Each structure stands twice: as structure tokens, then as C-alpha cells.
Amino acid sequence: MAKDTRIDRLFSNLGLMTRNQCKKAVKGGGIAVNGEVCRSEAEKVDPDADKVTWDGRPVDTRRFVYYMLNKPAGVITAARDPKSPTVMDYIFDLRTDLFAVGRLDKDTTGLLLITNDGQLGHRLLSPRYHVAKTYEAGISGVLTENDIAALEAGVDIGDDSPTLPAKVRPLNAGGPQSSCDDASGAAQKVLLTITEGRYHQVKRMFEAVGKPVLTLHRSSFGPLELDPALNPGEYREITEDELKQLKKCAQ
């Protein structure tokens, strides 16, 4: 068992108290490790194995946590914002090191992974691993066969290079219109899967084929599928199996 974290640092990292406050709590006998009263704020514990209590209440000391959030519209992907609610306002965890893996625009809804595992978060976002992300887009107009071919081959969105090939699946019953059909004024829902994470990429891709995005919802991130039981603003911990799949896709 690797006892590598000081008690005062543990409580500070979790956002439960300052290191000075922890010192006072230890002095008062309020903190115990594996049933034994802690005698020094410098005592070291293994956050993933030891059982820590504070005034008799168990403390969640796990080193890493992983949450799936169904992000609502109108919410900023940030730790805090002076004017708008943020995704962290929905996570009832006192840890101060949580972050969102990637960003969803303020008006975009759907699956967002929240964690404090910086290494995994970095790998999931790294261009090296090409982790897939699927979005359901409501667009203005109807994709033509040429539009779909362009999106699937890669389109110029004003960056140094075209986008990587994507997967496109129209969700309307009739499928895509032929290139000569007039799709002006029509609307369509489309599933788009990409393996990059460029700034406003999905919106820019549809703009490139003349079909502006009206609504955008992320339904999957790598192997994670948004839990249909989660209403907007709700979250849950991901399962051990889901975590294993996430780690596997970024190896």
C-alpha cells in the first residue's frame, strides 16, 4: 500500500478545509484513518485504499473520480464564470481539481466527461488517439449526396488543413437528397462522428457545405454513450467497465 499523501494536503485538495484547519481538526481528534485517530497532520495515507473519517463521517478520498454529465443548454464549460452557470455548478463534489474533458459550446447539450484524472483527459483529447465523438445536429437545409461526400472526405473550415474524414448519417426517413434537388428552407437532423476537437468544428463543418447548425447535442464520447436516464443537468459516476473502455481507446 502506497501511503503517499499527507492528511492535510488530502483534505485541502478535496476542498474540505485548509491545511491549517486540518491541523486543528487533527489536534481535536476529529480525523481518523482506518479507525485510528490521526495524531499528526503530516500522517500519510493511501487515498484509494485507506478509510478516512471526519467527525465520524466517511470522506471520499479516491484519487480520481469520473462523472458523466448531461450538459444543459445555456451552461458554460468552465470551472466558474461571473455571468453564467457553469458545468461545475451541477457537480456536487467538493474536489477543487475537477475539470471537463474538452468543451461544449454554451448552446450545445449532451455528454460531457468530468474528472480530475489529468493524464486520461489529456490522452482522450490528444490528436494522436483520434477518439471519436458523435453529435446530433439539427441543420438548416437538407444534406445533398455531394455534401455528405465532402464531409466524409474532409472539408476546408479555414484552418491550415482540412478536417479529417468524418462519418455522416442523416436521420430523416427519406435520406439525403440528390445534388440537383432544391433543399432550401428544409431542415434535417444528422449524426456526425468526428475524431478531432477543433474550435467550433461541427458548426464550421456544416457551414462549409452551406447548412448552418440550428441545434447541437453530443450523444457519445469515445465508447461512452450518454445515459438516457440522465435528464439535462443530471450526472452519474461512470462504471468500472466504462472506465476500462475509455482508457483502452486512448492507449
Image (cartoon, grey):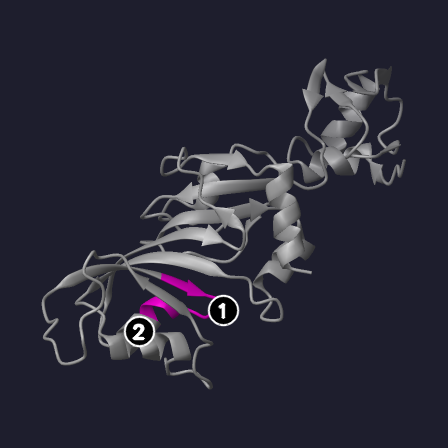
Residue closest to the far top: 56
> Is residue 145 found inside the magenta-colored segment of the image?
no
Q: Which residues are magenta?
A: 192-204
Q: Quadrant of the C terminus?
A: bottom right
**Helix, strand, or loop for circle 2?**
helix
Estimate the spatial distance between the alpha carbons at disc 2 and disc 1, rounded to whole Å: 18 Å
Q: Position of residue 103 (x, y in %)?
A: 46, 57
Q: Earlier in the sequence, mark 2 or mark 1?
A: 2
Q: Nearer the viewer, residue 98 or 115?
A: 115
Residue closest to the far bottom: 160
Q: Position of residue 171 (x, y in %)?
A: 26, 57
Q: Amino acid at mark 1?
A: Glu
Q: Quadrant of the N terminus?
A: top right
Q: Nearer the viewer, residue 6 or 231?
A: 231
Q: Nearer the viewer, mark 2 or mark 1?
A: 2
Mark 1 Cα shell of 10 Å, populated few (<14), some (14-19), many (≥20): many
Can you tell which quarter of the image residue 52 is in? top right
Judge whether 29 appears above or below 152 on screen.
above
According to the image, label 1 marks what residue? 196
Judge whether 144 appears above or below 27 on screen.
below
**Which residue is pictured at 67% across the width and 36% down the height?**
14
Q: In the visual, does 182 lie left or right of 71?
A: left
According to the image, label 2 marks what residue? 148
Can you tell which quarter of the image residue 10 is in? top right
**Which residue is pictured at 41% across the width and 56% down the height?**
104
Q: Amino acid at mark 2?
A: Ile
Q: In the visual, does 187 lie left or right of 170?
A: left
Judge whether 195 appears above or below 246 on screen.
below
> Is residue 195 found inside the magenta-colored segment of the image?
yes
**Which residue is pictured at 86% across the width and 41% down the height?**
4
**Helix, strand, or loop for circle 1?**
loop
